[in-house]
Amino acid sequence: MKNAFITGANVGQGNLLAKKLVARGWRVFAGVLPGAPTDLANGPALTLVDQDVSSNDSVRRSAETVRQALGDAGLDLLMNVAGVANVATGTIEGLKLEDVPRIFEINAFGQLRVCQCFLPLLRKARPPAKIVNFGSGAVLANPPIAGAYNMTKHAVHGLTLTLRNELAPFGIQVASIWPGAVKTGMTANSHQTTMDSWNRQPDAVKAAYEPYLKKGVTELLPEMIEKKGNSADYVTDEVLKLIELPRLKSAYCVGRDAKPLGFLHRWLPSGAFEAMIRAAYRIPAAKA
């Protein structure tokens, strides 16, 4: 029986991945935020492990819990799924700087903590283990008023690329997953969420950017999520196909919206790709 650890398994994609891996015969350790609701329960092949990825001590304790449970066995798969989106939102000029550390602590430093603490277990696995770090299609599209979020997901891929070099001698494979829009609690009620993000900015900033950005981020973006967003069930099925591959690439676009975006990013000149993204948000060019 193979062993896996999944962060952020209370709800959403981490929750579905835990259930699906158990159904496929894996032994799963599900990292759950203490006190947060979840429908997961301990069972013969599922063990809930308290873990707050924003806390050094919590991540260390979770790794020790798994180490004791595994005994001499290694960890075959680590899936870094935990993350937040609706924190430190706003244009770069208008976001609250005091909110930015929080999103980095969870999305970027959280994955760093988990990788560091679980690597001794991953190095013990035979055949060599795999690490899957959840990023976002935002690393390609870089949507407006999500600058802090975008930055954290770029940082995640930097972690992935570094680990691919450092862990190559051990045979451990590492990949970033770049989903498109996924219909989970994070994207629920997107019209209200994007409007709230817009309204949290200072009045002077809103006035400066409103003619160019407001419609795109508070109307067009929510419409894109509702019309083209992927179900979490579909995305997690696609991810589970990837972990069965004998050799992982550095990154995979996952989702009916993200895959075409990845293709266009590879083949279009950077200026043409950026113009396409701006056109989707109706962001005008500067007037001469």
Image (cartoon, helix red, strand yellow):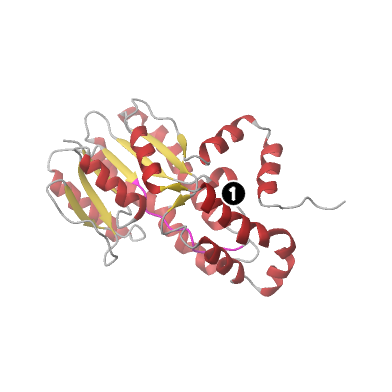
Give the residue pinned by disc 1. 142
Task: Name above or below for residue 194 compared with residue 283.
Answer: below
The residue under the point 46% across, 44% down is: 179
Looking at the rendered structure, the kind of residue marked 1 is Asn
Residue found 44% across the figure and 43% down from its top? 159
Residue 86 horizontal side relative to residue 45, left or right = right
Tell me, yes or no, whether the highlighted magenta stretch contains residue 82. yes
- In front of the other: 38 or 188: 188
Pick whichever, 237 or 103, lies toward us.
Answer: 237
Q: Nearer the viewer, residue 126 or 270?
A: 270
Q: Indicate whether residue 26 is drawn in magenta.
A: no
- Range covered by the magenta-colored residues: 80-90
Q: Does dot 1 land on a helix, a strand or a loop?
A: loop
Residue at screen point 15% across, 45% down? 45
Q: Is residue 82 left or right of residue 117?
A: right
> Can residue 96 be seen here?
no
Q: Is residue 65 visible?
A: yes
Quadrant of residue 237 in the image? top left
Q: Residue furthest bottom?
A: 203
Q: Position of residue 184 (x, y in %)?
A: 41, 55
Q: Residues within 10 Å of mark 1 (few under 14, many from 20)?
A: some
| Residue 218 % position (x, y) | 61, 61
